């Protein structure tokens, strides 16, 4: 169902370099945390996504991999009745997530986890409601991730980058909600009814939400909580 490695490379190379360089400039001059990631062969606990800021970078890298792969498939196999305007939106969102994925991968350098094995077999990509519902789900989850992990980030440059990404991702969610049902961009399931702010979730909660689509076993024991 996923595109070939060659097509993936071509798409990545065509993503707007201004978006990528804009994010990369945020981290210019900062030192990278190069802790080693891996797993213990005896116990096989899964891929350790790391600790501290490196762990959080890998955490967002996981989400970026999932989202990029999903939208690459959406654009490659448009659902029945997708309008040119909708295809443009999905294409732009795809490019955003590819840019985030590559930005985080390059920022992590040798500490980046390997590419994930994903499974989108439960999604009917030819069906409008299936694609829109899952688009909203992935964007909401990523928004909750940024809102819930910001206070755990130590490097202020990383926090700035995450906040910028979070702002764009939240607009993705609003756009897809509005496509599905006009005027629903600020639905109650994403807003805290007490303080009127967007909901937030811990890294452990968020990874639990996307676990269904990730076949790679992830070890989050060292992730900030």
Image (tube, helix red, strand yellow):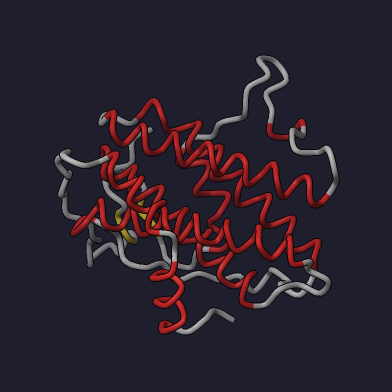
Is the C terminus in the top left, top right, bottom left or bottom right quadrant?
A: top left
User: In percent of the image, x 57 and y 58: which residue is there?
Assistant: 92
Taking the view exactly as shown, the residue that stands out farthest to the top is 195
Left or right, 148 with reference to 220: right
Would residue 130 appear left or right of 52 to someone viewing this image? Answer: right
111 in relation to 70, above or below: above
Residue situated in front as seen by the camera: 17 or 165: 17
Quadrant of the frame with the N terminus? bottom right
Q: Is residue 134 left or right of residue 44?
A: right
- Identify the residue shown where x is 40% and y is 57%: 101
Q: In this view, does 190 lie above or below 3?
A: above
144 above or below 2?
Answer: above
Residue 144, quarter of the rendered image: top right
Name the residue at 42% across, 82% down.
5
Q: Is residue 110 left or right of residue 115?
A: left
Report the residue that reaches farthest toward the front.
Answer: 18
Residue 223 lies, in percent from the top left, at 33, 41
Q: Measuring 72% from the left and 50% from the top, which residue is drawn there?
A: 176
Q: In which quarter of the image is residue 48?
A: bottom left
Please determine whether, in this image, residue 98 is positioned above or below residue 156. below
Q: Which percent across, then down, holds residue 178?
A: 78, 45
Q: How many labels does the image show?
A: 0
């Amino acid at each position: 169902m996923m595109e070939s490695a060659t097509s993936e490379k071509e798409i990545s190379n065509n993503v707007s370099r201004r978006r990528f360089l804009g994010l990369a400039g945020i981290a210019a001059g900062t030192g990278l945390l190069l802790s080693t990631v891996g797993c213990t062969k005896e116990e096989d606990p899964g891929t350790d996504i790391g600790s501290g800021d490196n762990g959080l970078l890998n955490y967002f890298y996981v989400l970026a991999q999932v989202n990029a792969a999903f939208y690459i498939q959406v654009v490659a196999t448009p659902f029945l009745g997708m309008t040119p305007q909708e295809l443009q939106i999905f294409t732009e969102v795809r490019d955003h997530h590819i840019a985030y994925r590559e930005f985080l991968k390059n920022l992590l350098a040798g500490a980046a986890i390997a590419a994930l094995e994903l499974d989108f077999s439960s999604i009917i990509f030819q069906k409008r409601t299936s694609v829109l519902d899952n688009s909203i789900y992935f964007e909401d989850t990523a928004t909750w991730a940024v809102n819930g992990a910001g206070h755990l980030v130590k490097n202020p440059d990383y926090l700035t980058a995450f906040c910028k990404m979070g702002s764009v991702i939240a607009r993705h969610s609003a756009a897809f909600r509005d496509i599905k049902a006009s005027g629903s961009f600020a639905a109650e399931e994403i807003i805290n009814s007490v303080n009127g702010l967007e909901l937030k979730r811990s890294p452990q909660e968020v990874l639990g939400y996307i676990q269904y689509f990730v076949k790679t076993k992830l070890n989050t024991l060292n992730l900030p909580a």
